Image: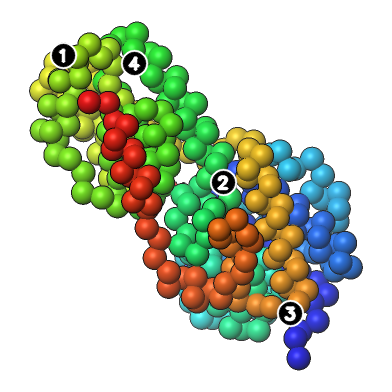
Amino acid sequence: MAKDIKTIGVLTSGGDAPGMNAVTRAVVRTALAKGMRVMGIRKGFAGLITGDIFEMDARSVSDTIQRGGTILHTARCPEFINKEVQERGAEMCRVFGIDGVVVIGGDGSFQGAEKLANLGINTIGIPGTIDLDIACTDYTIGFDTAVNTAMEAIDKIRDTSTSHERCSIVEVMGRNAGYIALWCGIVNGAEYIFLPERENISENDLIRRILENREKGKKHNLIIVAEGVGGSTELAERIEKVTGISARATILGHLQRGGSPTAVDRMHASMMGAVAVELLAEGKSNRVVAYKDGKYIDIDINEALKMEKNIDDYHVEVSRLLETR
Ligand code: ADP
Ligand code: F6P
């Protein structure tokens, strides 16, 4: 018989992402509406094992839907890979009367959620990461805000780059995934996008392209480099040395993780938070909420973790067609 869920816990884990507060809000409000109690767990699995846990009411999430970061705070807790630490986490749930936990984070956090599920705590994962690198879902909360933040920053870099007739190399986040780079490359009109998922052109070919474009009258150059490729500072130095064109590298860094979430992020966050609570209410466990082909679905965590994410071939093809030549 499915476990009757009376009290749920909610935590955010791994890197924060804009929209995590909107998920927390949706989890809290949906659970309260269904007559459940809600416990907030601070600092991800780190707060779970130390009992950094507090009761949440409807007011706990007031005025948070528009706020970046996560009011629950987040942490990386490497020791949670140890069985005895996971058992301490499950025991802490029992101490606080928590029957089910919503884990908002990426693939790493889902592995932690799976371990808790195996120890008898019903768990549901919600994809929250700016990287869009979770295979089971078409969308991860935070991506749209991060891409818009990066796009606006790159537009600004472009202004000064044009004024000085420079070559700008901009490195964007994404860990081993190139989604932010690919999207920025297309929406900012880059001359080339270095992606970790593809073989990229040689540096000689890139330099040849830059010089040819200058001959055609181009006043600036914009190259996007994904974090997973890296080396943007050194690339800028070599381009300047070989071409004589002034080149600057900008690593956008953590500004991509902050800021007020876009409508897209708030919407997915609200829907996924509600779906997660519905799943717990139905007695489900070890599931991830996913957005697939326009619908919210749930998938077994183990299955989800086995899936491989591939960058879309057609997006890459179009990005290559649009690169200035
Ligand atoms: P993300 O969730 O964004 O992928 P991480 O990979 O840093 O971020 O993982 C977040 C946290 O999830 C880790 O700090 C750890 O507490 C937990 N975690 C990651 N991998 C495992 C694992 N194999 N077993 C148990 N917990 C894990
Ligand atoms: O997963 C989100 C992310 O911002 C990645 O894009 C990046 O590689 C990583 O986290 C940075 O982590 P930290 O906050 O530990 O510097």
State the separation of the CA atoms marked 3 and 1. Answer: 66 Å
At numbered mark 3, what does the secondary structure look like: helix, strand or loop? loop
Give the quarter of the image for residue 191. Answer: top left
Circle 3 packing at 10 Å, graded few (<14), some (14-19), many (20+), is some
Residue at coordinates 40% horizontally, 20% vertically from top-left?
A: 157
The residue type indicated by label 2 comes to Gly
Disc 2 crowd, CA 10 A, few/some/many (<14, 14-19, 20+): many
Q: Mark 2: which secondary structure? A: loop
Which residue bears the numbered disc 3?
A: 283
Q: Can I make out residue 298 in this image?
A: yes
- Which one is earlier in the sequence, the residue at label 3 or at label 4? 4
Number of numbered callouts drawn:
4
Question: Against 57, is 193 above or below?
Answer: above
Q: Earlier in the sequence, mark 2 or mark 1?
A: 2
Q: Residues within 10 Å of mark 1 (few under 14, many from 20)?
A: few
Q: Give the label on residue 215, or none.
A: 1
- List the residue tagged with mark 4: 161
Residue occupying image coordinates x 52% and y 32% = 149
**Callout 4 amino acid:** Ser
Counting residues from the N terminus, which is met first, the one under dot 4 or under dot 2? 2
Query: N-terminal of the two: label 1 or label 4?
Result: 4
- Looking at the rendered structure, the kind of residue marked 1 is Glu
Q: Residue at x 65, y 77 (%)?
A: 285
Q: Are marks 3 and 1 in contact (CB under 8 Å)?
A: no
Q: Evaluate if marks 1 and 4 touch, with contact meaning CB atoms under 8 Å apart.
A: no
Circles 3 and 4 in contact, beta carbons < 8 Å: no
Secondary structure under the numbered disc 1 in the rendered image? helix
Closer to us: 273 or 250 = 273
Residue 320 locus on image (x, y percent): 28, 38
Residue 139 - label: none
Decide which of tag 3 and tag 1 comes sooner along the chain: 1
